[in-house]
Image: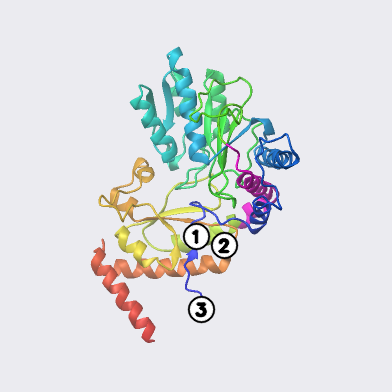
């Protein structure tokens, strides 16, 4: 009997695809492509360099870019840091020290901006419009003469809404302001063609698309050439922007993952859209359930709030499912989701929110089981009290579980 929870947390990370793992394994031992890609004076290094070049082309192909415009990093967090800090610090001498971003960005962007504020930059944090989308009009109204960068994510990692980066990019281009996009949650899930939209910098992560953790990339638009100050020094690798020996096996894994995602994107998008609709139908059949976010959105993310329920008790009851809570229930502060609070949610409603994220291994049976688990948990917790006391709810759940064993 398999007692493992049903995994519905693909937005947090995905398992490495077996096809990707096989390609990576071939780059680890002395029988494979293990050498330093910079050691091009011998065959081993040349083979590694070719493997890296192939992967660079695979990554570029998924987003409609050229291979030479891809800079490998340790992940999207480093790519965000390199893009935002790199442009802001390089612009400091010119007096352009203003950044525009949104309150609902990933912490990799928000914390980076706060660090730059400590260094003397000014940051405008936009409050998203209806359903959590940032509009081009909002960005345009926030621009100043001293604005050096706009950073708006493509897909929100908590609620799945898609921001209109094509429209925002147009506004930035007209104003002559560089535009950075965190695409960690969108690459491989929605079509991206950088040959048709104005994006100067775009961050990517492999582990969100069935590649390995510890590898990502930053796309750098060649024209106009941005001045970017590196945050790592020591050898001048990757266009002088990211020093360090390239991890061939990680890069090959990212390339293969992106190639698979490009090949399967359309079919997987349609399949996940059907599963998302099935899940939503089941969840919204319950009373006092609110969908967080709106359309357009990626098909793999569903975030809902359950009124009249205490968040920690809800997550305890949902243990048969591996899902994400929007509340930091285990912390001393029990801080609720800053994304949902930015959208106007109360702390109580934000804490009783759950993100379900679907992936390649998700089946209709998994969705039906998830609906069953959620329905049972919500019904029982609401029966206990409108805002269930955590200890009382846990005791009731434990008692019910012990009785179920006996039956």
User: Within the image, what quadrant is residue 45 found in?
Assistant: top right
Which color scheme did the rendering employ for the protein?
rainbow
- What span is colored magenta in the figure? 245-271
SS at mark 3?
A: loop
User: Within the image, what quadrant is residue 36 found in?
Assistant: top right
SS at mark 2?
A: loop
- The x, y position of residue 339, in whole percent, is 38, 43
User: Within the image, what quadrant is residue 174 found in?
Assistant: top right
Q: Residues within 10 Å of mark 2 (few under 14, many from 20)?
A: some
Q: Which residue corresponds to mark 1?
A: 8
Q: Which residue corresponds to mark 2?
A: 362
Residue 1 image label: 3
Please state the total of marks drawn on the protein image.
Answer: 3
- The x, y position of residue 91, in whole percent, is 47, 18
Verify CB contact (< 8 Å) between mark 1 and mark 2: yes
| Prevailing secondary structure of the magenta residues | helix
């Amino acid at each position: 009997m398999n007692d493992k929870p049903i995994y519905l947390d693909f937005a947090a990370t995905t398992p490495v695809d077996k096809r990707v793992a096989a390609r990576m394994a071939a780059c680890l031992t002395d029988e494979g492509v293990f050498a330093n890609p910079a050691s091009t004076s011998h065959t081993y290094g040349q083979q590694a360099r070719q493997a890296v070049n192939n992967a660079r082309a695979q990554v570029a192909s998924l987003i409609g870019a050229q291979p030479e415009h891809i800079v490998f990093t340790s992940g999207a967090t480093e790519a965000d840091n390199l893009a935002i800090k790199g442009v802001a610090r390089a612009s400091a001498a010119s007096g352009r020290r203003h950044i525009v971003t949104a309150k609902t960005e990933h912490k990799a962007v928000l914390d980076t901006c706060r660090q730059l504020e400590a260094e003397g930059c000014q940051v405008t944090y936009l409050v998203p419009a209806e359903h959590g989308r940032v509009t081009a009009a909002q960005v345009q109204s926030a621009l100043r003469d001293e604005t050096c960068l706009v950073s708006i994510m493509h897909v929100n990692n908590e609620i799945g809404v898609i921001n209109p980066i094509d429209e925002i990019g147009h506004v930035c281009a007209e104003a002559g302001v560089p535009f950075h996009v965190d695409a960690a949650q969108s690459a491989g899930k929605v079509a991206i063609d950088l040959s048709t939209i104005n994006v100067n910098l775009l961050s990517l992560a492999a582990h969100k698309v069935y590649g390995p953790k510890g590898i990502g990339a930053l796309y750098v638009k060649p024209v106009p050439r941005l001045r970017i100050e590196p945050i790592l020094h020591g050898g001048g690798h990757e266009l002088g922007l990211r020093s360090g020996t390239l991890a061939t096996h990680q890069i090959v894994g990212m390339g293969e993952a992106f190639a698979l995602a490009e090949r399967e994107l359309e079919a997987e998008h349609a399949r996940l859209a059907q599963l998302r609709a099935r899940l939503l139908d089941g969840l919204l059949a319950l009373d006092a359930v609110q969908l967080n976010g709106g359309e357009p959105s990626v098909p793999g993310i569903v975030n809902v709030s359950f009124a009249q329920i205490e968040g920690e008790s809800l997550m305890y009851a949902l243990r048969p499912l591996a899902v994400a809570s929007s509340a930091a229930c285990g912390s001393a502060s029990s801080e609720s989701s800053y994304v949902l609070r930015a959208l106007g949610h109360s702390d109580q409603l934000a804490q009783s929110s759950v993100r379900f994220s679907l992936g390649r291994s998700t089946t209709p049976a998994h969705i039906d089981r998830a609906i069953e688990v959620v329905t049972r948990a919500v019904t029982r917790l609401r029966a206990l009290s409108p805002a269930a006391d955590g200890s009382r709810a846990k005791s009731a759940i434990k008692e019910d579980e012990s009785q179920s064993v006996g039956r």
